[in-house]
Amino acid sequence: RVCPQHSERAKRRGTMNQPSRAEKFVLPEGVRKLTFTRDTKVSNAGTFIVQKEDHTLGNTVRMQLHRDPNVVFAGYQVPHPSDNRIVIKVHTNKDSSPMQAMTEAVDHLRTEVSDLSQKFSDEVRAFKHQQGNDGY
């Protein structure tokens, strides 16, 4: 039998230094989700900071930016594991701008996700229809 004090200490030990899970995805009031800063030394370059995101979005956006022939460089980083933001650097040629490249990349990703969602729904519907016809 476990004594109540020992049990209470064990509960606290598991979460003692653990930040709230909401800190990873809930945007505090007054904080912007996305900010952009132009690079003062390199033309057609800038930095996007996206709050409350991680490698999942960072790598996806970076790969989409690389598909744009006007993008000279696109990279991202997560400054620190406990810092729930990503920093995306974009450099474009003279035919585009970082803002235009990012807007197009996000639009393409939205289309891809929408298409994938539709295909998934169609497959689920077809599967359910097949199961109904097979007597399951």
Image (spheres, rainbow, N blue to C red):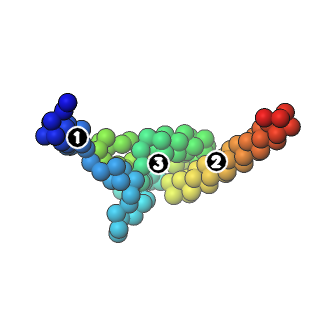
Which residue corresponds to mark 3?
90
Q: Dot 2: few (<14), some (14–19), or many (≥20) neighbours within 10 Å?
A: few
- Say which quadrant the C terminus sits in: top right
54 on left or right of 15: right
Tag shown at residue 11:
1
45 on left or right of 122: left
Instruction: Name above or below for residue 110 compared with residue 1.
Output: below
The three-letter amino acid code for the residue at tag 3 is Val
Mark 1 touches mark 2? (CB < 8 Å): no
What is the CA distance from the residue labelled 1 to the residue labelled 3? 45 Å
Element at badge 3? strand
Front position in the image: 124 or 74: 124
- Disc on the earlier residue, 3 or 2: 3
Q: Quadrant of residue 12?
A: top left
Of circles 3 and 2, which is in front? 2
Residue at 67%, 51% (x, y): give it: 114
Q: Position of residue 128 (x, y in %)?
A: 77, 41
Residue at 39%, 64% (x, y): give it: 32
Which residue corresponds to mark 2?
113
- Say which quadrant the N terminus sits in: top left
Residue furthest toward the bottom? 30
